[in-house]
Image (cartoon, rainbow, N blue to C red):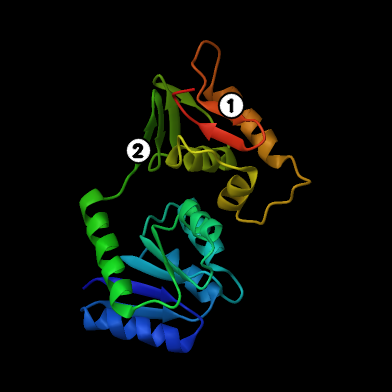
Amino acid sequence: MTKILTIEDDETTAREIIAELESHGFDVDWADNGNAGLNRALSGNYDLVTLDRMLPFVDGLAIVTAMRRENVDTPVLMISALSDVDERIHGLRAGGDDYLVKPFASDEMAARVEVLLRRKSRQGPQTLLHILDLELDLVARTVTRRKVRIDLLPMEFRLLEYMMRNSEQILTRTMLFEAVWGYHFDPGTNIIDVHIGRLRRKVDGPGLPPLIHTVRGSGYILSEHR
């Protein structure tokens, strides 16, 4: 039976979600706060997670960020009262697969869940990321370019993984900091620039076409077309 985790602190909303999903034949567990939800989500024992954006203790954005950082690829339907376009984009870029705004129709929520489950069953787990001649192996935890191994520190590996998953997109310092480090961005820190500099020196070696580019005034992009 398909097993779903619902992370929602509002009991009324949670019971509506659970009742609708169970009526479709799904087995649903409920976590009513961010700490409990994070621990269960990281277990990898679920086929899908419905995730409230605003939660006590640990918010939804931090949960989905931690899941992707730990290579938990369970599909996530983010559900939030925050309807601003930037909020939706932020949730999706952090690793959410879909975003549903409250208040919502229960049957639409269930339909979105079914779509995500079908998509997951077709795709299967992605363990190799490729950009041009750059390859990142999520299972072996290795990176190569032109078949030559590149030794990366753990945080460099996470940073490169996020950039490869979001290649051809401009990634702001805020997006990188929150997605990779899991904290709110401090504009006074240069940690992003330092790590990008180190990663660029390792990935874009002498004689290789550069893949990591600075977008002045915006952030960085991993692209083979610039």
User: Residue at 47% across / 78% down in the picture?
Assistant: 8
Whole-percent x and y of residue 148?
44, 20
Q: Secondary structure at mark 2?
A: strand
Residue 128's tag is 2
For the residues bearing labels 2 and 1, Cβ distance under 8 angstroms: no
CA–CA distance between discs 2 and 1? 20 Å
Quick one: label 2, few (<14), some, or many (20+) residues within 10 Å?
some
Q: How many marks?
A: 2
Q: Is residue 214 above or below residue 18?
A: above
> For the residue carrying disc 1, how many other residues have a C-alpha within 10 Å: few (<14), some (14-19), or many (20+)?
some
Q: Position of residue 30 (x, y in %)?
A: 41, 80
- Where residue 16 sits, quadrant-wise, is bottom left
Provide residue 143's location: percent of width, then percent of height.
45, 31
* Mark earlier in primary sequence (2, 1): 2
Position of 3 with respect to 88 (left or right) is left
Residue for badge 1: 200
Residue type highlighted by circle 1: Arg
Q: Is residue 68 visible?
A: yes
- Is 71 rendered above or below residue 19? above
